[in-house]
Image (spheres, rainbow, N blue to C red):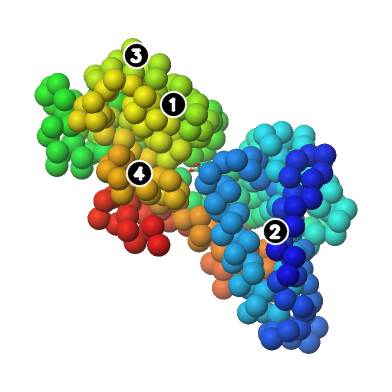
Amino acid sequence: MEKGIKRVCAAGMVLGLSAGMLAGCGGGAGQGEPKSIRIGVSVYDQYDTFVSQMMTDFNEYAARREEETGVVISIEIYNAAGSQTTQNSQVEEMLDDGCDVVCVNLVDRTEPTTIIDMAEKNQVPVIFFNRELVEEDLERWNQLYYVGAKAFESGVMEGEIAADSFKEHPEVDRNGDGIFQYIVLEGEAGHQDAIVRTEYAVSTIVENGVEVEKLGYAIANWNRAQAQTKMTQMLSEYGTEIELVIANNDDMALGAIDALKASEVDREEWPVIVGIDGTDVGLAAVAAGEMAGTVYNDKKGQAQAMLDLAYELSVDGDLTELDLEDGKYIRLPYAKVGPDEVETYME
Ligand code: GAL
């Protein structure tokens, strides 16, 4: 087994997983089916907590599929480190290397054209994931797919958790004015999840009969340290007037918690904090009562769906079992995780 081999290339880290089993060992690979397949993956930023946990699940599931099928699954994961130009070169390298399919977590979801053109020229299918491109781009060629989640659902669920907190715990309305004063910590500007989550979280709170007042917002790019800085600034401006922190993901909710811990605000005076993702650290914060809840972004389900799709595309297999929406999309549902559910998700 050569699991976890690391080689460094100009563009950043490449993590290779391959040859979990020798081809044919205990395998289900029938006559005429390939003995090995090669999948290239490029992630927008290897330090993104959710994406890196999804990649761990992807590798683990690939090893299981290897054992089940007897087909060697080689995976190379590249880090685009926030550069679309780097990512384009990585995809070019994967195509030169003979990858059967490439999985792309776009850096800039509005710039998929170079990748699509190269892939079409080489007749190699592309699975985009997590950072959703517009439908028109996905329609440019019939071998383009998207694996992700139902973005609006996460916002609705986050809003429900916040509304329930307000209704079930009157003390969270610190100033007793019957209005939930909130701030938002947003992901990247222009990211489909950031836009949709903020919109639906707020509208859902209102639809659930809770009046809201927005005190402020800040873009923190899904990042814990940036969120801590932004929250520190907002705390100095609004202090304990902030009754609710709506974070577009768990890492930013945790950044808000870091800021609160470093501030003079007493634990009893903390605002309600809600997040999205259900990362390991996010779940731990729910279990500790620091976050009111999170919304589970099914990284395992998305990793498995992406591997299953990549596998079938590589072996020219059957896609009908995969339940593709419009022949192109796989979108996994979210789930609410409060104190009652958190144990189940913490495994
Ligand atoms: C979102 C996720 C964020 C971040 C982002 C990156 O779906 O909730 O935490 O990983 O994707 O594109």
The amino acid pointed to by label 4 is: Ala
The residue shown at (34%, 28%) is: 261
Mark 4 or mark 3, earlier in chain = 3
Disc 2 target residue: 4
- Residue 316 appears in the picture as rendered: no
The amino acid pointed to by label 2 is: Gly
Alpha carbon distance from label 2 to label 4: 29 Å
Residue 254 vs residue 203, the one in the foreground: 254
Alpha carbon distance from label 3 to label 1: 12 Å
* Ligand 1 within 8 angstroms of badge 4 C-beta: no
The amino acid pointed to by label 1 is: Gln
Alpha carbon distance from label 2 to label 1: 32 Å
The amino acid pointed to by label 3 is: Ser
The residue shown at (13%, 32%) is: 171
The secondary element bearing badge 2 is classed as loop
Mark 4 or mark 1, earlier in chain = 1
The secondary element bearing badge 3 is classed as helix
Mark 2 or mark 3, earlier in chain = 2
What's the mark number on residue 285? 4
Disc 1 target residue: 228
The residue shown at (64%, 40%) is: 45
Alpha carbon distance from label 4 to label 1: 15 Å
Q: Is residue 285 above or below residue 69?
A: above
Residue 142 vs residue 20, the one in the foreground: 20
Q: Are marks 4 and 3 in contact (CB under 8 Å)?
A: no
Q: Are marks 2 and 1 in contact (CB under 8 Å)?
A: no
In the picture provided, is 168 more to the left or to the right than 265? left
